[in-house]
């Protein structure tokens, strides 16, 4: 079996966050430093993926680096550069914006690694598709991935969907929740620091949530509301659970979600006692 190297993807522009996500602090140190240490504990060697213009940037300069060879095409540039730089190694690819990631999540991925596949990845807790940015990419991925990039394609998830990928269930639904905006950063920081402990359920424990149903959902659920004890940590988790109970066929892209009468994102953290509404399209709109 090929040696396993780690790669922390830190070459993004952080456009939505409006500040460098790698430099954010959730755990008493920069998110890049924290992720690097987490991955280094389970890999033979670990590197940080950077754009050419980031090599000497303060947050990244202290780490061993893999420099993008084709910058401007997103995270797939870092993955393909790593496979090219050390073609005999397998790579544990991890995004730097996953503050809920745990060592147990990485260890389970490694324990179930299949070196005869192109990759081993987790199914997303939100849509069951491959999570390419916490996955093991085998040496055999190098040539087909480069051909994919040369064809003008840039989505690593779509590559894994069409490749010989082993998919695993996530041991903890929130472990791969990525943080992209200032509101998400504030919410994640409060969750990690134990804010409002009387209302916030720890990951993996049940939350008591009130769900209200309107229009099509009320007809399909056969009720206008219900209270659920659920391990769902986000609206995305909750909607997936409800789809297993009721014939809800609408996709997340077709819906809006509100928590306590305020519109929210699908990755917001749910708390005990929250009221959630999934809002279907207005007929004729």
Image: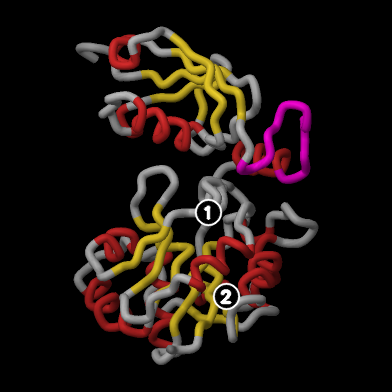
Answer above or below: position of 232 versus 136: above
Q: Which residue occupies 80% across, 57% down? A: 28
Query: At which x and y percent is residue 77?
Result: 39, 72
Which residue is at 60% across, 23% downward? 208
Question: Can I make out residue 78 in this image?
Answer: yes
* Residue 219 placement: quadrant: top left
- Is residue 178 visible from the viewing direction of this image? no
Residue of label 1: 171
Q: What element does badge 1 sit on?
A: loop
- Label 2 and label 1: CA atoms lie apart by 26 Å
Q: Is residue 230 above or below residue 222?
A: below
Magenta residues?
Answer: 192-204
In magenta segment, residue 83: no
The quadrant of the image that shows the N terminus is bottom left
Residue name at image x 35 percent, y 32 percent: 244
Task: Name the residue that disc number 2 marks.
Answer: 48
Number of the front mark, 2 or 1: 1
């Amino acid at each position: 079996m090929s040696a396993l190297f780690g790669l922390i993807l830190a070459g993004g522009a952080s456009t939505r966050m409006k500040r460098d996500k790698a430099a954010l602090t959730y755990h008493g140190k920069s998110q890049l430093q924290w992720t690097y240490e987490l991955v280094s504990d389970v890999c033979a060697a670990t590197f940080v993926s950077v754009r050419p213009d980031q090599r000497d940037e303060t947050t990244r300069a202290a780490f061993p680096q893999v420099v993008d060879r084709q910058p401007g095409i997103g995270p797939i540039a870092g993955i393909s550069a790593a496979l090219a730089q050390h073609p005999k190694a397998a790579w544990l690819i991890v995004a730097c914006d996953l503050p809920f990631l745990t060592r147990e999540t990485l260890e389970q991925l490694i324990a179930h690694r299949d070196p005869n596949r192109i990759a081993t990845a987790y199914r997303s807790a939100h849509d069951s598709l491959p999570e390419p940015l916490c996955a093991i990419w085998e040496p055999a991925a190098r040539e087909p991935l480069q051909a994919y990039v040369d064809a003008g394609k840039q989505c690593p998830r779509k590559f894994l969907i069409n490749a010989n990928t082993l998919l695993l269930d996530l041991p903890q639904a929130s472990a791969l929740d990525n943080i992209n905006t200032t509101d998400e950063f504030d919410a994640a920081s409060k969750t990690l620091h134990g804010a409002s402990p009387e209302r916030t359920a720890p990951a993996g424990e049940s939350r008591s949530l009130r769900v209200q149903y309107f229009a099509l959902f009320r007809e399909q659920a056969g009720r206008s509301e219900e209270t659920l004890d659920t391990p769902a940590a986000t609206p995305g988790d909750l909607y997936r659970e409800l789809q297993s109970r009721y014939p809800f066929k609408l996709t997340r892209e077709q819906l809006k979600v509100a928590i306590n009468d305020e519109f929210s994102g699908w990755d917001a953290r749910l708390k005990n006692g929250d009221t959630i509404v999934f809002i279907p399209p207005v007929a004729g709109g």
